[in-house]
Image (cartoon, helix red, strand yellow):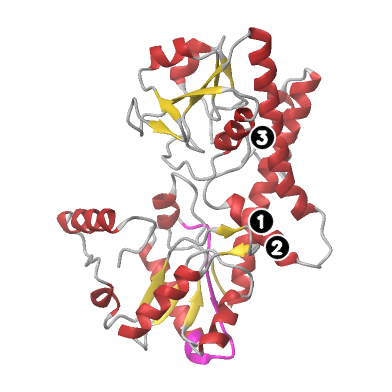
Amino acid sequence: MINRRKSPIEDAEIVNYLLSEKLDLTATADEKIAYDGVDFVIVAVPTNYDCEKNSFDTSTIEAVLRQVREVNDSAVVVIKSTIPVGYTAKLREETGDRKLLFSPEFLRESRALYDNLYPSRIIVGTDFNNEMLTHSAKQFAEILRGSALKKDAKVLIMSSTEAEAVKLFANTYLALRVSYFNELDTYAELSGLDTRSIIEGVCLDPRIGDCYNNPSFGYGGYCLPKDTKQLLANYGSIPQRLMGAVVSANQVRKEHIAQQVRERLKKENKSVVGIYRLAMKAGSDNFRESAILGVMELLRETGAEFLIYEPTLESGSEYQNCRIENNFDEFVAASGVIIANRRDELLNCVSDKLYSRDIFGQN
């Protein structure tokens, strides 16, 4: 069953593509066909963060669960969508449906296929008071391991609530690390120091390691912004300072970037900001919650104009009321300052106009 973040038309296109490839699978856009007679149903639908409710919107998961049970009341439903801590156990109690597992995904933007084939770990959350469900959790874990090329991936079977916590704490740690090196870079930039030298010296400590250390405009994408907010909300009255700081640090970083661009526009008497790519990471076409969009919002407040270079969008069209110009020479000529969250070789010839904090040329 194709049930991701696409429209019905796009779903049909995906199904037709999969069928045309003659892979060892059956693809359909009909949920009745998909759910009938299967042992496991994997639910991987959006759970966007609802700022008013201060929680993920899990309504789509619940809608899919109702659809599944109309067709198949014996299948074990495995939730892959990121959810609040305690959600699966609560759902079991509220619905009386005991055949619910949670298995978190740990997929990097632009590396999802690789991370599925070479998983860092396989985690399945169950209810240990339910012997049948725990057996199903072990079965599902073996299915995941069997479909991976990395056969020695560590498998952890734990309670569903602990598995939910693993996902949120893992992503918040990654966001923490991004924020740490971004604030290191802010200090170095404003103090006239060499960011690269400092980061290299810090990261040679094997306890710190050389990863997730390339400065950016902030963490973004579909997962980290919403997952950090959800974990913070889960804390409630539990004492904390660090989790809240991670969330606020990302906004502070975008404000700093916007201020640096404003000062450069003022100094050079320019008004047009060229946006080089909207995606969060190189090699990705995902704009959702991209940090550069947050920087644009802040710059828009002071009257800046924008021109966007984004080859995945049609040249001459608009994105958020900003014109797309995919003729690179015309894009450069019309831009006063060009900002890029991630650099590539195409930007080597425009260093005089470029503002980027990408030090190492990697995601």
Task: Determine which residue is flagged by label 3.
Answer: 254
What amino acid type should be assigned to the residue bearing mark 1? Lys
On the question of residue 206 being in view, the answer is yes
Name the foreground residue: 303 vs 172. 303
Find numbered disc 2 in the image and state the secondary structure of the residue it sits on: helix
The quadrant where residue 333 appears: top left
Occupied quadrant, residue 125? bottom right
Q: Nearer the viewer, residue 338 or 183?
A: 338
Drawn side of residue 100 relative to residue 196, left or right:
left
Q: What's the amino acid at mark 3?
A: Lys
Quick check: 308 left or right of 237? left
- Disc 2 vs disc 1: Cβ atoms closer than 8 Å? yes
| 354 to the left or right of 72 | right
N-term mark: 3 or 1: 1
Identify the magenta region. Answer: 119-133
- Mark sitting earlier along the chain (3/2): 2
| Residue at x-position 74% and y-position 29% | 186
Task: Give me the residue at 47% from left, 37% from top.
Answer: 279
From the image, tell me which residue sits under label 1. Answer: 229
Residue 186 higher or lower than 268, as above or below:
below
Residue positioned 62% across, 28% down in the render: 299
Question: Which quarter of the image is occupied by the C terminus?
Answer: top right
Note whether residue 201 is visible: no
Alpha carbon distance from label 2 to label 1? 6 Å
Q: CA distance from mark 3 to mark 1?
A: 17 Å
